[in-house]
Image: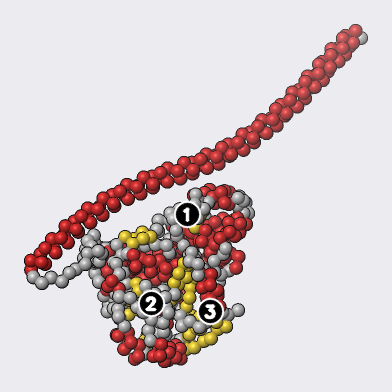
Amino acid sequence: MAIITKFTTVEYGQNSELSQLSEGDGSRCNARKLPVVKDLNCMVNEMKRILVHSQNIDEATFSMKYGRLLEITKIEVLNPAIKALINFWDPDYRCFSFGKVDLCLTVEEYGMLMEFPKHLHKVYFPLRSDKVIPELSKLLKIPHLSRFLEKNANGLKWKFLEVELERKKLQYGSMLERDRLIALGIYGLVLFPSLSGVISLEAAAAFVEYENTHVNPITAILAETFLTLNHFRKTGKGAMRCCTQLLYIWMVSHIETKKPIFNNFWWFNQKPLKLVEEEEWGSLGNQGWMKKLQELPSSNFSWKAPWVKSVDVLVSCGQKCWVPLVGITGYVSYAPALVIRQLGGIQHIPRTVGVAEFSGFFKDQSALEVLETIKQDWSHLTLIRKESERLRDPSSSEGYEKWRNLTPTAAPRMPCSEDGPSQIIEGSLKRKKVSNEEDLMGQLERLQIELGKSKVDKTTLEMMMMEGDKSRVFLNEQFEYRDAKIMMLELQLSKGKAIMEESEKERGTLILDWMQSSSELEALKADFNDYQENAEYNQDKFLHI
C-alpha cells in the first residue's frame, strides 16, 4: 500500500519554486533543429475489425468491467490533425508547446476519458513473457493457444482469434470468454497497436495483468504514447504505436469550436464531434492544422477540457520531482507540475531536472534495475488538490509567467510545403566561408550537382523499397487469405460431418421404426387370416344345422 502525501496547489507550488531556484531547470531541446513530421501511419483501421463482433454484446455489462473500451474504438481520427499536433511535441519536457503555453496528457485526464473501474494511481509492471500465453489460454478457455502465434512468435494473429470468437458466440455459457476476446482485441489493436492484424505479446500481457491483478492500464497507455511521440518528434516518421483515438479526443477537447462538441453524456453521442469535423475542420489539411495549432492559445483555446472533474492530481513519486511511467515496451518520465492549470489548479514554476534523461526500453540491459527503482518510487506518492471548487478559471503565479517567458519555446516552424523539404539536412556537405562572388557561385554549382545526384539516388531507393514492400504485402495477404480460407473450410467440413452423422442416426432410427412396423403389419395379417378362417368354419357349420 503506497504512502500518500497531499498538498494544495499553492503549498506545492511555493515549495516547487523554492526548489527550482536552487536546482535550476532540466535540459530542453531546440525544436527548430528537429525534423517536421511528414510520414505518419495512425493505424486506426483496425477498429472496424473489432466493431463487427461487438454488435450483440451487453454494452452495460462490458462497460462495468472494461470502462469505455468500446466507445474509444468507435472514434474516427483526422490524421492531418494528429500529424500537425506531433510537430508541437517537446521530447525533453514531455509536453506540447504552443508559443508560451505548455499542454500535456495526464494520468487523470486519460482516466476520466476511459473510466476503467480500477484504482487510477497504480503503476503497471509487465508480466514475464513466458507466462503470457499460458495465462491467456486459461482466461479465454482456448487450449493450445500458441498455435495462433505469428511466424516470429511476437504476437497472436487476430484473424485466428476471430474464428474462436465466432465459436464462442454459438456456445451456451461462453459470454465471459467472448467479452474477454473482444477486450483483448481492443487492447492489441487499439490501445497498444503493433503490426497490422497482430496482438503483440506485450499488449496481451497488459490484458492479463488487468484481468488477474486489476491494475489500471492508464499509466501504461500514457507511457507508450510518450515513447511514440518522442520517436516521431526525433525521426519525423513512423507508425503510431499508441492509442491515437485517445490522443485525438484529448486534443480536440482543448480547442474551442462554434458548436459545443462535448456534453454530460458525450461518450454516448459523438454526432456533435462529426458535425464540427465536417463544418469547421473539413477543409483543413496538414498546413491548415499546423496554422490552427500555431495560433493557440491566442484564439480558440480552452485550458480545461469540458469533461474534466475536480480530482487529486499525482505530481511526483518517491524522491523524484516528477512521475516515472512504465509501458509495455519501455519506461519514461513526465512532469504533471508543468500543466497544473489543465486540471483547474494554480500554475507555479515546475521542477524539471532529470525529466529529459529518464527514458528507455526493456531490451536495454539496465531496464530491470530501473524498474526496481520505479517500484520503490511508486510506494510514496505526492498528490495535490484544488484550494476551492469556486476557482474555475485556471491561473498562474507571477514567478511562473516570468520563468515561462525566459524558457525557450518548443514550437516548430512551418514546413515549406505539403510535399517539399521541411528542413536542410546537414550531412557531409560543410558550408565554407567564401571571399568573393566567384567562389560562392562555384560552391553553389557543386552543391546543386551533389544535391541532384542525391535526389536521383533517393528516388531510385524509394522505388525499390516500394516495389519490395508491395510484393511482401501481396504475398502476406495471399498467405493470410489462404490460411483463413483453410480454417473456414475446416470449420465447414466439421459442421458438415456433424450434420451427416446426425442424418445417419436419424436414418437408422427410421429403419428400425420401419422394420418394427412391418413386423406388426405381418402379425395383423396373420390375425386377420385366422379370423377369416374361423368365420368361414362357423358359416359352414351354421349351414349344416
Tag 3's secondary structure?
helix
Q: Residue furthest right?
A: 545
Q: Residue 356, image x and y in percent? A: 40, 76
Neighbours of disc 3 within 10 Å: few (<14), some (14-19), many (20+): some
Q: Nearer the viewer, residue 502 or 404?
A: 404
N-term mark: 3 or 2: 2
- Residue 399 drawn above or below residue 335: below
How far is mark 1 from mark 2, CA to CA?
32 Å
Q: Residues within 10 Å of mark 1 (few under 14, many from 20)?
A: many
Q: Kindly check if marks 3 and 2 are in contact, taking CB atoms under 8 A apart as contact.
A: no
Residue 310 in sight here: no
Q: Which residue is disc 3 drawn over?
A: 377
Q: Secondary structure at mark 1?
A: strand
> What x and y, as percent, mark residue 164?
55, 50
Query: Which of the two discs, 1 and 2, sits closer to the camera?
Result: 2
* Relative horizontal placement of residue 470, taking residue 495 as reference (left or right): left
In the rendering, which numbered label is found on residue 93?
2
Q: Earlier in the sequence, mark 1 or mark 3?
A: 1
Residue 413, how many percent across, how many down? 25, 71
Residue 418 seen in render: yes
The residue that label 1 is drawn on is: 198
Residue type indicated by callout 3: Asp
The three-letter amino acid code for the residue at tag 2 is Tyr
Amino acid of disc 1: Val
Q: Position of residue 14 (x, y in %)?
A: 42, 91
Residue 454, above or below 279: above
| Vertical arrangement, residue 151 with respect to residue 8, above or below | above
Q: CA distance from mark 3 to mark 2?
A: 20 Å
Q: Quadrant of residue 269?
A: bottom left
Q: Regarding mark 2 in the picture, which secondary structure is present there?
A: loop
Scheme of colours in the image: secondary structure
